Image (tube, rainbow, N blue to C red):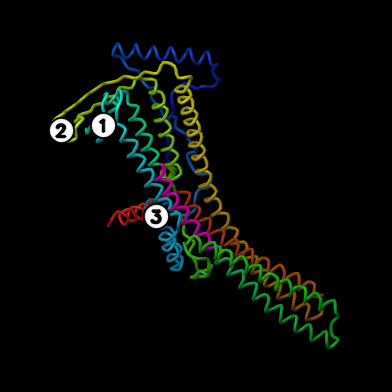
Amino acid sequence: MGKIKLAIPKGAQERACVPLSPRERVRREGNSALGLILCTVLGGCAVINSHTPAPLQPHETWRTAPTTPASTNTEEILAADFWNSFGDPALDQLMAEALQANPDIRIAAANVENYLARVTATSADRFPQIGITGQGARGKGQTFGPETSSAYNLGMALSWEIDLWGRLARATDAARADLLAQREVQRGVYLSLAASVARSYFTLRQLDEQLLITRRTLALRQQSLDLFQLRFDGGVISEVELSQVRSEYEQAVAAVPQIELFIAQTEQALSVLLGRVPGSVARGLKLDDLKNPDIPAGLPSQLLARRPDIRAAEAQLTAADARVDAARLAWFPRISLTGLAGYASTDLNALSNSRVWSGAAGLTQPLFDAGRVGAGVDSAQASRAASEAQYRKTLQNAFREVEDALVSRIKLREQVTAQSRQVTALERYAELARLRYENGYTSYLEVIDAERTLFSANLNRVATQGAMLAAAVDLYRSLGGSWMDARILSDLNNNASP
């Protein structure tokens, strides 16, 4: 298994670790400004420090390797709709509904459109701005003369900041990187939503199974209570034994509404994920009938490079790099062109015969701004440092999530196997304890202990089954995937169509 090499772009070497005094900041700004003026006059140009990669090297292999046979179709498996691998048509229908109607999907799409518009607006600053001007005025005085007169003008104005140093280009690069990050956030919304729907559905099926076990236990304890009530009425047993049986019965009675409450809350939460009014949710296969898919062995760590959160963090770091460059380039002179062509006259009827035009070029160079530009550079560098730290944190968290999901699937599967054997043994223990009590070899306390332990073990086994299925979902989610790309493209085409 090869190593993953996810390069982290690094900024320039300067780091503002100690705040400058006002006098020192003014001195540096003055020297920098004078240097830039001299550089401009001599025809030179400053060079922005390049960014060199600093790869983060994780372990060569996962801490917990999958136990299934190796396969070469990992990419194909992770590119497909992962919920289909559980084999439940009801889950497939719920997922289709969620991906179509969930509000977060619409919010993510709208945010992408917002950032796309920002790119257009930022990029527009690099091009000439042309507009039509018109004015009409009437007055008397210094401008209009000693007599009351009118003045009219109509023309076309042009303004253009020449991006000689690339400041506006870097600002556009930052906006494009923000757009890429937002698109990855949109992919992450799809991935998170699908995982949440699957996990909620498995929790619901787990609670359904636990409710079934509880009601079956309650029915058995009702029969025991009725039988012991008859025996007590006949004077065969004491009130102590009757009270013991009634206590176990009431315990099962109390467990039913508690599980029903959890079911209602889970259904309501799942309904919100589906984009509908809270209510009941259709079920499909039982928990024991759901497939537990196997992820092929030999998962390359490079798969994590396509995770939406990693891609988003990388794009945000790229945007921060661009903003650092743009902030530094604010020291350079700004060259702008302006022009006006049109007509001006004191007589509206003669306006077309009075042509006027003008053109100008201007250069603006900051000399002293009380630390505004320097503070902008410091702010951009600090934001860049935070983005780099966030990128590293995202990478580390991604490896942790995959490791957690891998070890959870393996250990939970082992736990389910052991718990199933425990339930089988406890069923035999409860049967033998009841026979011993019926034959007078032991008290009813042994029967109560056996049935109580069996009831608890059954509930725990079902809970572990649900957790094992949820761990499979977590593994699919932590590895990312590309199944959402086709849906995003489809939604984009549908919104673009008239």
Q: Residue at the location (55% across, 16% down)?
A: 21
Picture quarter containing residue 306?
Answer: top left
Give the image location of residue 443, x and y in percent. 82, 75
Q: Residues within 10 Å of mark 2 (few under 14, many from 20)?
A: few
Q: CA distance from mark 2 to mark 3?
A: 77 Å
Give the image location of residue 64, x and y in percent. 53, 47
Q: CA distance from mark 2 to mark 1?
A: 30 Å
Q: Nearer the viewer, mark 2 or mark 3?
A: 2
Q: Earlier in the sequence, mark 2 or mark 3?
A: 3
Check residue 77 in the rendering and tell me which mark sits there, or answer none.
3
Q: Is residue 417 above or below residue 180?
A: below
Q: Earlier in the sequence, mark 2 or mark 1?
A: 1
Q: Is residue 371 above or below residue 224?
A: above
Secondary structure of the residue carrying tag 2 is helix
Q: Quadrant of the N terminus?
A: top left
Q: Residue at the location (48% across, 42% down)?
A: 61
Give the labeled residue for mark 1. 128
Give the image location of residue 332, x and y in percent. 36, 20
Q: Does residue 132 appear left or right of residue 241 in this picture?
A: left
Q: Which residues are magenta?
A: 181-202
Q: Is residue 189 above or below residue 210?
A: above
Q: Residue at the location (44% across, 29% down)?
A: 54
Q: Quadrant of the C terminus?
A: bottom left
Q: CA distance from mark 1 to mark 3?
A: 50 Å
Q: Amino acid at mark 3?
A: Ile
Q: Residues within 10 Å of mark 1 (few under 14, many from 20)?
A: some
Q: Does residue 366 appear left or right of residue 263 in this picture?
A: left
Give the image location of residue 172, x and y in percent. 34, 34
Check residue 350 in the rendering and tell me which mark sits there, or answer none.
2
Q: Amino acid at mark 2?
A: Ala
